[in-house]
């Protein structure tokens, strides 16, 4: 459900309740009345209604500040994430519902000059007011999520969740992985029977429904080769997929329906996006205008954790087979080298003159190599040599370069040699 519909649902429920609830109360429980005078009740209800409008304005202000703060302090790609927080829309809905119901309640006070104030309807207004106060307090408390530590933790949690969803542990049993990989190489030589292209404004691939593609490929008795990866931005006339072989023609419209497009990247099916955001925060912190290497070190903490998890997972998952084990879909997925360079290349370049960042970067690479397979560990060791080369070419003097070449999980805290 779209977030903007949430306040509308609250308002609709409040409108229906305001019309029906007081009417049923007066008909079924005519003796249940509030002892408060009519003028006092109207004054109190009017104050509650006007106060709810003020709180609603505050919600808009909080949402605006959230977007501005996250875009300036962290990354512009986080702005929409914070702005679309459902808590903001639920709070706005409760405030607007309280306002609408209170207005209708005022219409039932002294209805027809009877001088009565419905008791249960009055208590419902009080309950909505208490709920609004609680939601507002929780919303203000939620502003702590904007702290850099919490923001990095939230991004890391999203990345850990998608890694667990997308990849299989290396020590888990697998069926015919090598056979499917060999078949994938052979299929690429099969002639293309249908090419699917995207036409329209630039959009980003948010999700690929491989199960639907497998069904269509099985129906056509062919193989579908997806040429774009999740996270790619499609321009007009971009090739998305090729159907290789096949005896039954497939619908291009149905093939396109298996690809979910969005205005920006999402975490779904995209472990790279969490790393991208963490790197964005790190290199922004390393910019001369901000000069906050400690934030970059905290970002590396989360990046290291994600890479350690990726190092224990099988990354060769860019294919899908049907129930009979026949290869049906091939789609691009990032390799270990892709993840390594995405995680550290820009931080290494922008933090080359920061002793703290270099020490933490080395510590992260050593830790990742320790848990990775032999082949992946060799890639990490080659990257460490590249890191050393960058340190040797940096603007640091000889003594600082020697200090920067030591690993330290805190950046500047306790060197590996002293810890040993």
Image (spheres, rainbow, N blue to C red):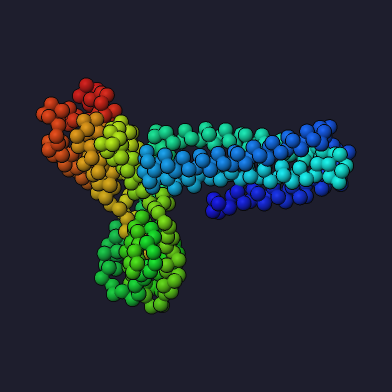
Q: Is residue 387 above or below residue 224?
A: above
Res. 125 image quadrant:
top right
Give the left or right position of residue 12, taking residue 116 as reference: left
Can residue 372 be spotted in the picture? Answer: no
Q: Is residue 389 above or below residue 13?
A: above
Provide residue 353's location: percent of width, then percent of height: 19, 34
Query: Which residue sits at x=47%, y=33%?
Result: 144
Provide residue 420's location: percent of width, then percent of height: 22, 23
Outermost residue toward the left in this view = 398
Give the left or right position of residue 291, taking residue 27 as reference: left
Image quarter hosting the N terminus: bottom right
Provide residue 95's location: percent of width, then percent of height: 63, 42
Q: Is residue 112 above or below residue 190?
A: above
Query: Which residue sits at x=87%, y=43%?
Result: 113
> What is the number of callouts on the image?
0
Residue in front for this viewpoint, 118 or 342: 118
Q: Is residue 88 above or below residue 199?
A: above
Query: Which residue sits at x=44%, y=48%?
Result: 80
Residue in front for this viewpoint, 277 or 140: 140
Give the left or right position of residue 121, taking residue 300 as reference: right
Can residue 335 be spotted in the picture? Answer: yes
Outermost residue toward the top in this view = 418
Residue in front for this viewpoint, 76 or 347: 76
Provide residue 418's location: percent of width, then percent of height: 22, 21
Query: Which residue sits at x=78%, y=50%?
Result: 20
Res. 51 image quadrant:
top right
């Amino acid at each position: 459900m779209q977030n903007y519909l949430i306040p509308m649902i609250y308002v609709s429920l409040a409108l229906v309740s305001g019309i029906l609830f007081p009417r049923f109360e007066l008909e079924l429980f005519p003796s249940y009345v509030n002892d408060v005078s009519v003028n006092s009740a109207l004054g109190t209800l009017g104050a509650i209604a006007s106060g709810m409008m003020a709180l609603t304005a505050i919600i808009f202000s909080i949402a605006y500040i959230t977007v501005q703060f996250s875009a300036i302090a962290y990354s512009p790609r986080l702005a929409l994430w914070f702005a679309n927080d459902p808590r903001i829309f639920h709070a706005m809905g409760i405030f607007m519902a309280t306002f609408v119901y209170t207005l209708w309640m005022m219409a039932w006070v002294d209805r027809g000059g009877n001088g009565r104030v419905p008791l249960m309807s009055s208590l419902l207004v009080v309950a909505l007011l208490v709920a609004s106060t609680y939601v507002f307090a929780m919303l203000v408390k939620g502003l702590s999520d904007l702290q850099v530590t919490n923001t990095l933790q939230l991004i890391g949690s999203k990345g850990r969740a998608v890694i667990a969803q997308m990849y299989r542990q290396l020590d888990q049993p697998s069926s015919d992985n090598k056979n499917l990989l060999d078949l994938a190489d052979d299929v690429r030589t099969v002639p293309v029977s249908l090419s699917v292209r995207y036409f329209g404004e630039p959009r980003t691939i948010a999700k690929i429904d491989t199960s639907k593609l497998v069904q269509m490929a099985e129906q056509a008795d062919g193989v579908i080769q997806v040429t774009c990866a999740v996270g790619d931005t499609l321009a007009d006339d971009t090739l998305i997929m090729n159907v290789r072989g096949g005896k039954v023609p497939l619908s291009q419209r149905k093939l396109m329906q298996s690809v979910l497009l969005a205005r920006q990247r999402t975490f779904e099916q995209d472990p790279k996006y969490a790393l991208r955001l963490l790197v964005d925060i790190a290199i922004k912190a390393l910019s001369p205008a901000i000069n906050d290497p400690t934030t970059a070190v905290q970002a590396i903490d989360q990046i290291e954790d994600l890479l350690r998890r990726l190092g224990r997972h099988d990354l060769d998952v860019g294919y899908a087979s049907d129930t009979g084990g026949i290869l049906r879909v091939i789609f691009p997925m990032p390799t270990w080298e892709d993840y390594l360079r995405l995680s550290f290349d820009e931080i290494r370049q922008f933090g080359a003159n920061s002793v703290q960042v270099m020490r933490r970067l080395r510590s992260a690479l050593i830790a990742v190599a320790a848990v990775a397979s032999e082949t992946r560990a060799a890639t990490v060791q080659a990257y460490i040599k590249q890191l050393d080369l960058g340190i040797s070419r940096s603007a640091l003097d000889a003594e600082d370069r020697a200090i920067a070449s030591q690993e330290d999980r805190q950046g500047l805290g306790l060197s590996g040699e002293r810890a040993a």
